Amino acid sequence: MAHVIVGGGLAGASAVEELREQGYDGDVVVLGAESYLPYHRPPLSKEVLLGKEEADGTDVHDAQWYADQGVDMRTGSAARRIDRLRQVVETDAGDVAYERLLLATGSEPRRLPVEGAVYLRTRDDSRALRAALLQQPRVLVVGGGWIGLEVTAAARAAGCEVTVVEPQAQPLLGVVGERVGSMFADLHREHGVDLRLGTSFDGTPPVPADLVLVAVGAVPRVDLARDAGLDVDNGVLVDATLRTSDPLVLAAGDIAAHDHPVFGRLRVEHWDNAIEQGKAAARVMLGGTEAYERSPYFFTDQYDLGMEYVGHVPREHLGSVVVRGDLAARQAVVFWHDAGRVLGAMHVNEWDAIDEMRELVGQTVDPDQLSRRTT
Ligand SMILES: Cc1cc2nc3c(=O)[nH]c(=O)nc-3n(C[C@H](O)[C@H](O)[C@H](O)COP(=O)(O)OP(=O)(O)OC[C@H]3O[C@@H](n4cnc5c(N)ncnc54)[C@H](O)[C@@H]3O)c2cc1C
């Protein structure tokens, strides 16, 4: 029987890599619903939209790599149902029996009932959006989150007029808080964006728009898991080692609501998490018992701002923030803490700070020292 991975995305590809890296030479089957090999999504809202990279240039590995690894990579092959009693995954082309099963079905954009709205998740979405931006439409972006803001930056670079509507008082308020959120607001306003904060979108564009991009978050694709009777609650519930309520079935990446040993129940929709959880799940498929303990990590690029973020800061601690450097000049390292215990850290254009940030997350440090320490 094979090790089977459902979901041909980044978490799935990373799991395959690790299975072989660990010396497993048995059968590996990957079922991917998309017609493409697994690819990286971060460039889809950045380099691809800016015309710096081709949409089909972001493959994790090429077809030859999967062939060389002896992996049965089935693109355009969705899993329809999981029968845990028989230990098979049902597809249109027949059943695939599994010894261990990894679910890595990712997430999809939350939709709003807006006729003609566009969304950004896939390679095809990105390609179509790039072509549309080149026509310089008047763009309305619904949602001032990461993807909304990255598309905004790309649309401005393409010469489009852009309006962003965001119901909260600052963009990214729930992730970075008031102070850092206002830095992102300033960044976009300085680049000529009509940023309308505290504005809920009721379906009627507040300004004339030729293109409406809805970017109001993502929802995990949990139907397969739920239908198979696995425990699901805002993601597929997994223990510290990424096992679902059925120990033969694991979950990784965007769909996994993980019992993190440090941060508690956490579902992380980030690139690094898909890579590292995919690998960690593969080790557990091979009999490993290690808990997944890595701190969430995220990055973004908007205009000339590059940032990296490590950790997890619950909303109630977003106000406990220490800034080292000059946030207004967009050259700074930011720490969030709970009575000195560092919960999260982020740098803005301070690329040398990342190692120190990783080191400090979880440690207790005098906040005064945090603001002074030099990297
Ligand atoms: C436009 C964009 C920009 C991003 N930028 C950043 C960034 O800058 N930094 C960052 O950290 N993260 C970023 N992310 C998030 C990051 O890309 C995701 O966290 C990551 O792709 C998650 O990987 P995954 O493998 O869990 O899921 P996915 O990449 O969604 O892959 C899951 C795959 O499973 C397939 N699938 C679903 N159901 C089935 C089924 N029944 N059978 C078979 N296959 C199925 C899907 O079609 C999909 O191909 C971005 C995401 C997007 C969309």
Image: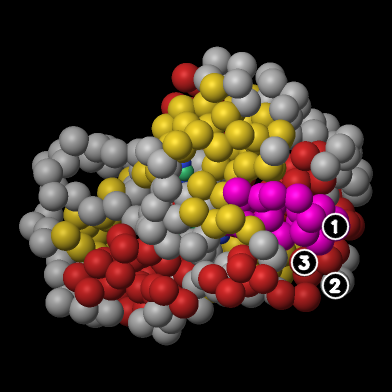
The image shows residue 180, relative to residue 80, as above or below, that is below
Q: Position of residue 137 (x, y in %)?
A: 15, 70
Residue 375's disc is 2
Is residue 91 at least partly visible in the picture?
A: yes
**Mark positioned earlier in the residue sequence (1 or 2):** 1
Quadrant assignment for the C terminus: bottom right
Q: Position of residue 160 (x, y in %)?
A: 22, 73
Q: Are marks 1 and 3 in contact (CB under 8 Å)?
A: no
Confirm if mark 2 falls within 8 A of ligand 1.
no
Q: Main secondary structure of the magenta part?
A: helix
Inspect the image, locate mark 2, and give the three-letter code of the amino acid beneath it: Thr
Q: Please check the rendered image and state whether residue 18 is part of the magenta-colored stretch, yes or no.
A: yes
**Mark positioned earlier in the residue sequence (3 or 2):** 3
Q: Which residue is mark 1?
A: 23
Q: Which is closer to the viewer, label 1 or label 3?
A: 1
Q: Secondary structure at mark 3?
A: helix
Magenta region: which residues?
10-29
Instruction: Classify residue 345 as left or right of residue 37.
Output: right
Q: Secondary structure at mark 2?
A: loop
Instruction: Count up the numbered dots.
Output: 3
Residue at 39% x, 73% y is 55
Q: Are marks 3 and 2 in contact (CB under 8 Å)?
A: no
Q: Position of residue 25 (x, y in %)?
A: 79, 55
Q: Which is closer to the viewer, label 3 or label 2?
A: 3
Is residue 296 at least partly visible in the picture?
A: no
